Amino acid sequence: MDSAKSGPSGSSLWASGGTMFAGVLMLVNGVLGVLAGITGIAKDDVYTRLGDYVYKFNLTTWGWIHLVLGVLIAVTGWGILKGAEWARAAGVGLAAVGMVAQFLWLPYTPLWALISLALSAFVIWALCTDSGDSASRGADTSGARGGANTGR
């Protein structure tokens, strides 16, 4: 019974697992953003030209926006996977900026923009619901120090 009390609860495991998954999603979404950016920069004719769109930019400009944002998101996702403290706050901010960019990019790739919006919303939720000490809890789950230090 004592070992059940010293281990992490089910909700904290879910939150730490969600944070790990958010890091992976950010890493993959960042790499895909870099690839979309390179496509927009190198081949300006890959994406369909729009008629009259309020947030219309040159496709090369959109390519640079996606490239820079993709690099930042991928680096932050890597930081989340490594357990860096700065990465959680940066991840929430970059996921929010990524959501705005995908909303503005919606007419160019509607299906992917909607999927990316949903993934970014999950990333924000996962990073905001994790208590922040899941990395230290993960080190204690082996039982090496968990039984002696139950009064956290």
Image: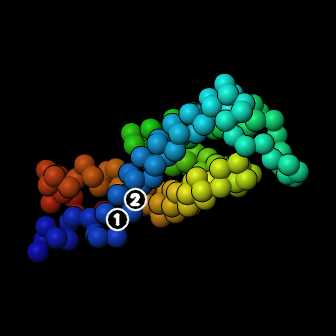
- Residue drawn at x 58%, y 52% is 112
Q: Position of residue 105 (x, y in %)?
A: 71, 49
Front residue of this view, candidates 107 and 90: 107
Which residue is at the far top?
42
Count residues near mark 1 (Cα–Cα under 10 Å), then give few for <14, some for 14-19, many for 20+.
some
Determine which of the numbered discs, if any, sits on residue 34 in the image.
none
Q: Can the viewer see residue 21 in this picture?
A: yes
Mark 1–mark 2 distance (CA, rounded to whole Å): 6 Å
Secondary structure type for disc 2: helix
Q: How many callouts does the rendering have?
A: 2
Give the image quarter of residue 146. bottom left
- Residue drawn at x 40%, y 59% is 18
Secondary structure type for disc 1: helix
128 to the left or right of 148: right
Tell me if residue 143 comes above or below residue 84 in the rendering.
below
Query: What amino acid type is highlighted by mark number 1?
Result: Trp
Q: Are marks 1 and 2 in contact (CB under 8 Å)?
A: yes
Count residues near mark 2 (Cα–Cα under 10 Å), then give few for <14, some for 14-19, many for 20+.
some
Q: Quadrant of the N terminus?
A: bottom left
Q: Position of residue 45 (x, y in %)?
A: 71, 33
- Residue drawn at x 42%, y 46% is 24
Tell me if residue 119 comes above or below residue 1 in the rendering.
above
Give the residue at mark 1: 14
Query: What amino acid type is highlighted by mark number 2?
Result: Gly
Give the image quarter of residue 83. top left
- Residue drawn at x 34%, y 70% is 11
98 to the left or right of 151: right
Give the residue at mark 2: 18
Q: Can the viewer see residue 74 in this picture?
A: no
Which residue is at the far left?
1
Q: Quadrant of the C terminus?
A: bottom left
